Every structure is written in structure tokens, then in C-alpha cells.
Amino acid sequence: MTSAARLPQDSAPGEVTVEGATARLVFRRHYHHPPERVWSAITEPEQLRSWMLTEARIDGRPGGSVDLVTGPDRVHATGRVLQWEPPRVCEYEWNVPPGPLMPSGEAAVIRWELTPDSDGTLLVLTHRHLSRATAAVFARGQRGFLDRLSAQLDGRALPEWPPAPRGSAEDSA
């Protein structure tokens, strides 16, 4: 058995907004680290592998490509980099072909925005044009990934994946 940290009780949930047949998911998190450090964690393949369980190839430039294989279910997404402004904005397409987990596939956009403040960095992570079903799943799962990002930035043990359900006996212990 491996030793892992528990998820923070105060990690913020995402906001889901339904927009017709699709949905938008927004997470806001504050990290006590400079934007350059957070940028590295969200764009460097070796760091993404650790906290987000993602094998990544990123051609970091507008028009560049992304190729991501994420999580225990090995979801494969590809796309183009739409905006690349280190260390402030990284936006790319997130295209997933139809498969067992996403029968209709996905054609979404992911945007990472970093804003420096006096005590670190505000991260705003937005997933646009997700199917409603995927947005509902991501609203739970992305919260756990962002908890893992926090632990990695702080140099703490990463919380287990998948995270324990909120409100479980383990959460209240």
C-alpha cells in the first residue's frame, strides 16, 4: 500500500453552465506560487505526467499541436494550440474521437489562465463546448486533479487517484 495525502477539504468545486447542447466548466484556484511555476506544471510533459496522469506532447506556439493521453481510462485527445502566452494563457482544442467513454466524442476547448497576485497565482481553468455528460464527470474529476496540482506545487505527497467521493467517511475523519 502506498502512502498518499488526503484531498483538501476546501478545494473549490467547478461551475457548470449549460449552453444549449453543450456545457462550460470553470474552475478557479489560488496557488501560493508564481505564475512561472504554475505554468511549468500545466505545460511541461513530465509535470503533467505526475499530477494529471497525462502523457503529453505539446508544440507550444499558436497553431502548434497537442496530443494528450489522460487518466486511468487513457482518454486520447488531440488538437491545435489556439493561444500560447507564457506564463499567462494556454488554450487548445480538446478533440476526442467517439469511444466507449464518450460515445459521441468531444470537440471542446481547454483554457488555462494565470493571473499573478500579491500572494501567488490565480488559475482559471475553463473547458468550453463539452457535452453535458462529460461536463458532469469532469466537474467531479477535475477538482481532484487540481488538488493534485496543489500538492505537487507545494512539494507534498500527491492525493490518491481516483479521489474518494466527497462526503465519504474518509473525508470526515
Image (cartoon, grey):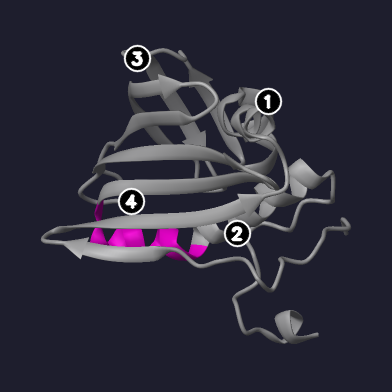
Question: Gap in Å between the C-alphas at discs 2 and 4?
Answer: 23 Å
The disc, 3 or 4, on the residue closer to the chain's N-terminal end is 3
Question: Gap in Å between the C-alphas at discs 3 and 1?
Answer: 21 Å
Question: Gap in Å between the C-alphas at discs 4 and 1?
Answer: 28 Å
Residue 42, x across and y down, in percent: 58, 33
Name the residue beneath numbered marker 3: 62
Range of the magenta residues?
Answer: 130-140
Name the residue beneath numbered marker 4: 100
Left or right of 60? Residue 103 is left
The disc, 3 or 1, on the residue closer to the chain's N-terminal end is 1
Q: Specify whether residue 145 is in view.
A: no
Name the residue beneath numbered marker 2: 144
Question: Gap in Å between the C-alphas at discs 2 and 3?
Answer: 29 Å
Front in this rendered view, residue 11 or 66: 11
The answer to whether marks 3 and 1 mark residues whose Cβ atoms lie closer than 8 Å is: no
Disc 1 element: helix
Front in this rendered view, residue 9 or 167: 9
Look at discs 2 and 3 and give the one toward the viewer: 3
Asked whether 133 falls inside the magenta stretch, the response is: yes
Residue 89, x across and y down, in percent: 44, 30
